[in-house]
């Protein structure tokens, strides 16, 4: 038996609770992992609270991230004793996830734990941080350099935003953070933001084109915020879009794309090919100031994960949440 969060949905309703789970109930897979830590991402918040249609099968163990040690394996990709990370691949949505003491997974889903990071540090990064790095890699791939000007990061005090701010600042970019929480201004400046703007000025409908300001952007909010970011991006600037914390709609015009040659790059971490994952984790090892992870993250127990999920969805959590499942 092992402990885990189980999401159930039946006549009694949608609910999440910590349960004792029989190992025989684990799904099929090549690799059994003894999980040490998981995390809470926005998607886990939606799954645990039931506020978004994330879970595709019941009962479900949520948790799109995990770090742990391989207990048994029939996969050529890993052997017992290996320390591994998992991010995404539909885990915690359609396949049992990381918010439990054990998981059974496909071997090629797993990435070796980079030696720079402890298990806690890897989860302080988690899917949110790895997605932030995918955004940075996309900006670089499209030729955005620090000399070209300011990079705007929206939802900056959240998980993706905090890591994006820290990494971009370390790489020498001038980062302008956008946040709905004025009280996090000092935190965002300590992460490396040169200026913090209020969320409100981005959240309502704006003009199709505004004054050109951004060389690049990392947007986690979507909706009017993403539209306004595109409308104020400089000629040939690059906007990476990875989130929907403010809404899934995109009420835009094509003006920034056809008149300013702005590029909008979609970022998906879930099905991202393995080679790019390995590169993102390698770059996190090189370009994220580990000392900032302590500032970014808080650690909670498995039991605390359920109430914390509601706070996360309400935008009350700063940075990242690590879950010690043991
Ligand atoms: P968090 O909850 O940690 O951060 C989201 C931040 O967005 C909040 O902290 C807040 O920042 C801001 N925010 C929240 N609600 C609103 C709102 N109504 N309007 C405007 N801003 C808002 O989530 P994550 O960082 O983990 O994820 C951010 C987004 O990215 C989510 O939508 C998530 O689903 C998505 N995501 C996508 C991935 C992909 O593969 N494409 C992978 C990982 C995440 P502040 O208080 O500073 O304003």
Image (cartoon, rainbow, N blue to C red):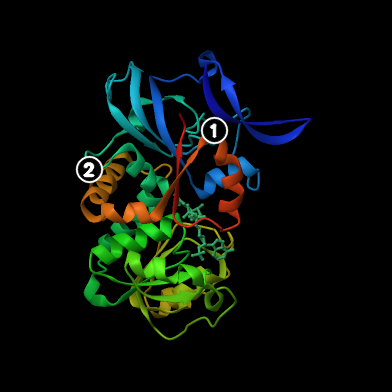
x, y percent for residue 270: 43, 43
Residue for point 47% across, 58% down: 158
Visible residue check, residue 142:
no
Total numbered labels placed on residues in the image: 2
**Label 2: few (<14), some (14–19) or many (≥20) C-alpha neighbours in 10 Å:** few
Q: Are marks 2 and 1 in contact (CB under 8 Å)?
A: no
Q: Is residue 198 visible?
A: yes
Taking 258 as reference, is 277 left or right? left
Question: According to the image, label 1 marks what residue?
Answer: 94
- Which residue is painted at 24% across and 51% down in the image? 283
Residue 13: percent from the left, percent from the top? 75, 35
Q: Nearer the viewer, residue 300 or 137?
A: 300
- Viewer-nearest residue: 300 or 311: 300
Q: Nearer the viewer, mark 2 or mark 1?
A: 2
Residue in the image at 54% along x and 33% along y: 94
In front here: 161 or 252? 161
Distance from the alpha carbon under mark 2 to that under mark 1: 31 Å
Question: Which residue sits at x=23%, y=64%?
Answer: 171
| Left or right side of 142 for 17 | right
Q: Which mark is residue 116?
A: 2
């Amino acid at each position: 038996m092992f402990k885990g969060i189980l999401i159930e949905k039946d006549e009694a309703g949608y609910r999440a609770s910590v349960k004792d789970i029989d190992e025989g109930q684990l799904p099929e897979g090549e690799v059994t992992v003894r999980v040490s830590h998981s995390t809470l991402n926005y998607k886990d918040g939606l799954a645990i609270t039931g506020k978004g249609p994330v879970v595709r099968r019941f009962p479900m163990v949520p948790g799109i991230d995990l770090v742990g040690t391989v207990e048994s394996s029939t996969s050529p990709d890993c052997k017992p004793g290996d320390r591994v990370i998992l991010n995404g691949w539909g885990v915690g949505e359609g396949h049992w996830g990381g918010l439990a003491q054990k998981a059974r997974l496909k071997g090629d889903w797993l990435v070796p734990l980079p030696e720079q990071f402890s298990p806690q540090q890897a989860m302080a990064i988690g899917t949110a941080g790895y997605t932030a790095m995918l955004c940075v890699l996309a900006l670089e791939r499209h030729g955005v350099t620090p000399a070209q000007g300011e990079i705007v990061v929206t939802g900056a005090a959240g998980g993706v935003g905090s890591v994006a701010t820290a990494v971009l600042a370390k790489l020498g970019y001038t980062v302008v953070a956008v946040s709905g929480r004025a009280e996090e201004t000092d935190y965002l400046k300590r992460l490396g933001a040169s200026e913090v703007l209020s969320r409100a000025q981005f959240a309502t409908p704006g003009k199709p084109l505004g004054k050109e300001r951004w060389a690049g952007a990392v947007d986690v909010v979507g909706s009017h915020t993403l539209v306004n970011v595109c409308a104020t991006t400089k000629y040939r600037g690059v906007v990476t879009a990875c989130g929907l914390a403010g809404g899934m709609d995109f009420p835009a015009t094509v003006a920034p794309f056809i008149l300013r040659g702005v590029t909008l790059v979609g970022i998906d971490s879930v099905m991202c090919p393995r080679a790019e994952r390995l590169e993102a984790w390698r770059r996190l090892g090189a370009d994220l100031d580990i000392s900032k992870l302590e500032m970014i993250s808080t650690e909670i127990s498995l039991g605390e994960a359920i109430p914390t999920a509601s706070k996360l969805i309400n935008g009350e959590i700063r940075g990242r949440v690590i879950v010690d499942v043991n």
